[in-house]
Amino acid sequence: MTRDLDKGKYAGYLAKAEKSLKVSKIALREGAYDAAVMNAVHSAINALDALTTYFLGKRSSGQHANPPSLTKSILTPQEQDDIEKQYKSLIRLKNASEYQPDMMKPKEAENSIKVAERILDKVRIKLPG
């Protein structure tokens, strides 16, 4: 499921991705590991939305559990493979970090931030400015 958008809206998604990543790092320092994971996940989602909005004028809507298929026409096969693996590692923690009673561990938070940073770095390279 996709949603059409003005391509200029990509900058808002990019800003949200960057801010979510920043908040994720603050949460990690404060020992709020669930919040760190949640924000890392949302950073990755917004980063990919920035990418697809800029290049395609659309973003995924609804389910985030599936790999980012819209990016296939934007990324090289190697980039797509890397991002899919990284995205899957993050998205599988989404439900646990947001809705389940078990708490995230420090290592899960640290790894989530690293993965979100990698995704955001790959997206930034593709976007202007």
Image (cartoon, rainbow, N blue to C red):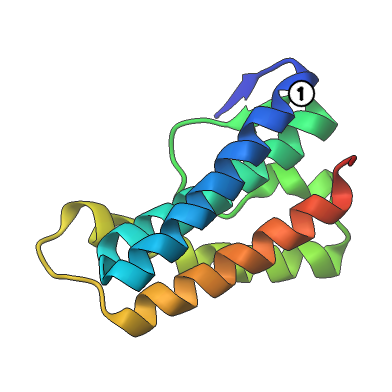
Q: Secondary structure at mark 1?
A: loop
Residue lying at the far left in this picture: please name it: 101
Q: Crowding near pointer 1: few (<14 within 10 Å), some, many (20+)? A: some
Corner quadrant of residue 38: bottom left
For label 1, the residue is: 57
Q: Which corner quadrant holds the C terminus?
A: top right
Could you say which is closer to the camera, residue 119 or residue 80?
Answer: 119
Residue at the location (90% across, 40% down)? 128
Of 52 and 111, which appears nearest the observer?
A: 111
Left or right, residue 101 beside residue 86: left
Residue 44 location, x and y as percent? 56, 53
Most foreground residue, 103 or 92 = 103
Residue at image point 63% right, 38% down: 15
Q: What percent of the width, then of the height, locates residue 69? A: 67, 47
Amino acid at pointer 1: Gly
Residue 116 vertical position relative to residue 14 in the rendered view, above or below: below
> Which residue sits at x=62%, y=34%?
13
48 sits left or right of 114 in the view: right
Residue displayed at 71% across by 71% down: 82
